[in-house]
């Protein structure tokens, strides 16, 4: 008997090797599940910076493609295999999607839009629909990017709406006007925060201090303090930034962590890292709660034989999921649980409460969520890249429901609701 679901849902699944890929749609509902693959078209052949960017997929099986040269959105019934889905952050206030462009591999520059001045981000609204609309492309710093969004809060009603983009290679954070009512700053870089700590740099550092070795990777906004917090991996510190002035107001030590992000309620941050040095046979994952009000870690757990890959929240904001990944020496990888997904109960914050360790056939590439029978119930979909399958999990009980075969397997996968 086919597995039946109380509500219709459609999930897009991308799989590939970061050079070529394909798209499938998983349809679920009272009639069961089925998979339909978009036909492959001819490769664009345009090369980096000019090949189409996959920004979404429609429910009627069309790829939503942004053409970098013309800035036009095209709907395609066939999928160009050299198209890759860019890393994306959604603005919680407007719903606009911000797509990150890391630039050319050698220089970190988006030579099409920014010349030799850095890479870029592109903004699209209604990305997973036939109404998808391109807004703008904005030049920012070089390197892998993360994003956070500031907005007025009850505690800080005067805060501006800004998109904040960290730039790994430059060691900076760009603050971008994100309020359409403010024409003077809207979609413009209003300040660039230099994260440089000169006492931790060598003498070869330029007078400007950019690029530096801050290596920012962990950007979060606190609705309580009204400040922006950036984790500098290279220095082992958190820079507390005033999003109005762009000034760094404080630096807080936070060594041993490689990423930091806000919990859904915005009150606490979660930081994660890995220790590969203490035990030559075991990788030790570190998960910490950072309280931006107190400016310190309030709880921490160490998890043996886990290296954390990605993080995901369920729609209710009550659970955090951390996927496993491969890292460490050959001796450490023998014991590594790269196929694990860890579930934490966020209602226990500021304490960390691990409620389940799920195991899969191979590492989970991505997680997505669809509705269930009630607002408190739903399903978690785990994309198993190497196996070419998607495991559907009852999110309330964490029990397996169904395994759906999508393809023959790939190095990389991504899955999202459309």
Image (cartoon, rainbow, N blue to C red):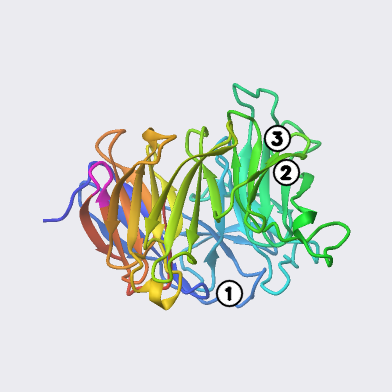
Using the image, determine if residue 202 lies above or below residue 291. Answer: below
- Could you tell me if the residues under marks 3 and 1 are in contact, i.e. CB atoms within 8 Å? no
The magenta segment is: 393-398
In this rendering, would 262 be left or right of 334?
A: right
Q: In x, y percent, where is residue 2?
A: 15, 55
Which mark, residue 180? 3
User: What residue does disc 1 label?
Assistant: 44
Mark 2 and mark 1 lie on one chain; the one further toward the N terminus is: 1
Q: What residue do we see at 71% from left, 67% from top?
A: 108
Figure check: 254 above or below 385: above
- Disc 3 residue crowd, few under 14, some 14–19, many 20+, Cα 10 Å: few
Q: CA distance from mark 2 to mark 1?
A: 32 Å
Mark 2 secondary-structure assignment: strand
**62 w.r.t. 231: above or below:** below
Q: Position of residue 1 (x, y in %)?
A: 11, 56
Which of these two is toward me, 37 or 261?
A: 261
The reply to whether residue 12 is visible in this rendering is no
Q: Is residue 118 visible?
A: yes
Task: Look at the numbered disc 1 and give the secondary structure of its residue.
Answer: loop
Distance in Å between CA atoms under marks 3 and 1: 34 Å
* Residue in front for this viewpoint, 143 or 279: 279
Q: Name the residue carrying label 2.
A: 176
Q: Nearer the viewer, residue 280 or 181?
A: 280
Secondary structure beneath label 3: loop
Task: Say which residue appears at 58% left-offset and 41% top-offset.
Answer: 91
């Amino acid at each position: 008997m086919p597995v039946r679901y109380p509500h219709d849902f459609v999930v897009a699944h991308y799989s590939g090797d970061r050079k070529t890929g394909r798209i499938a749609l998983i349809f679920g509902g009272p009639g069961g599940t089925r998979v339909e693959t978009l036909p492959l078209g001819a490769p664009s052949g345009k090369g980096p910076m000019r090949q189409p960017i996959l920004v979404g997929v429609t429910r009627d099986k069309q790829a939503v493609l942004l053409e970098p040269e013309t800035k036009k959105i095209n709907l395609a019934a066939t999928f160009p295999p050299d198209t890759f889905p860019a890393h994306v952050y959604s603005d919680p206030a407007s719903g606009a999607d911000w797509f990150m462009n890391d630039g050319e591999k050698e220089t970190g520059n988006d030579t099409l839009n920014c010349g030799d001045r850095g890479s870029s981000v592109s903004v699209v609204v209604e990305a997973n629909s036939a109404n998808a609309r391109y807004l703008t492309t904005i030049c920012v710093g070089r390197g892998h990017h993360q994003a956070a969004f500031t907005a007025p809060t009850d505690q800080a009603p005067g805060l501006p709406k800004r998109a904040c983009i960290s730039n790994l290679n430059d060691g900076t954070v760009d603050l971008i006007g994100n309020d359409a009512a403010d024409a003077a700053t809207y979609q413009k870089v209003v300040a660039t925060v230099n994260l440089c700590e000169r006492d931790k740099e060598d003498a070869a550092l330029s007078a400007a201090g950019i690029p530096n070795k801050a290596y920012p990777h962990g950007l979060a906004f606190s609705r309580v303090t009204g400040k922006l917090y950036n984790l500098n991996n290279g220095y082992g510190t958190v820079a507390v930034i005033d999003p109005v002035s762009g000034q760094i107001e404080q630096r807080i030590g936070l060594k041993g962590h490689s990423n930091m992000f806000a919990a859904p309620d915005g009150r606490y941050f979660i930081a994660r890292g890995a220790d590969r040095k203490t035990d030559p046979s075991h990788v030790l994952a570190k998960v910490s709660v950072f309280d931006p009000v107190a400016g310190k870690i309030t709880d921490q757990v160490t998890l043996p034989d886990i290296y954390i890959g990605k993080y995901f929240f369920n729609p209710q904001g009550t659970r955090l999921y951390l996927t496993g990944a491969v890292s460490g020496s050959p001796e450490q990888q023998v014991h590594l649980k790269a196929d694990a997904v860890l579930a934490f109960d966020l209602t226990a914050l500021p304490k960390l409460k691990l409620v389940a360790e799920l195991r899969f056939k191979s590492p989970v590439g991505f997680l997505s969520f669809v509705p269930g029978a009630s607002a408190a119930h739903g399903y978690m979909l785990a994309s198993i890249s190497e196996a070419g399958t998607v495991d559907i999990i009852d999110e309330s009980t964490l029990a397996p429901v169904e395994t759906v075969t999508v393809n023959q397997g790939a190095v990389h996968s991504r899955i999202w609701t459309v």
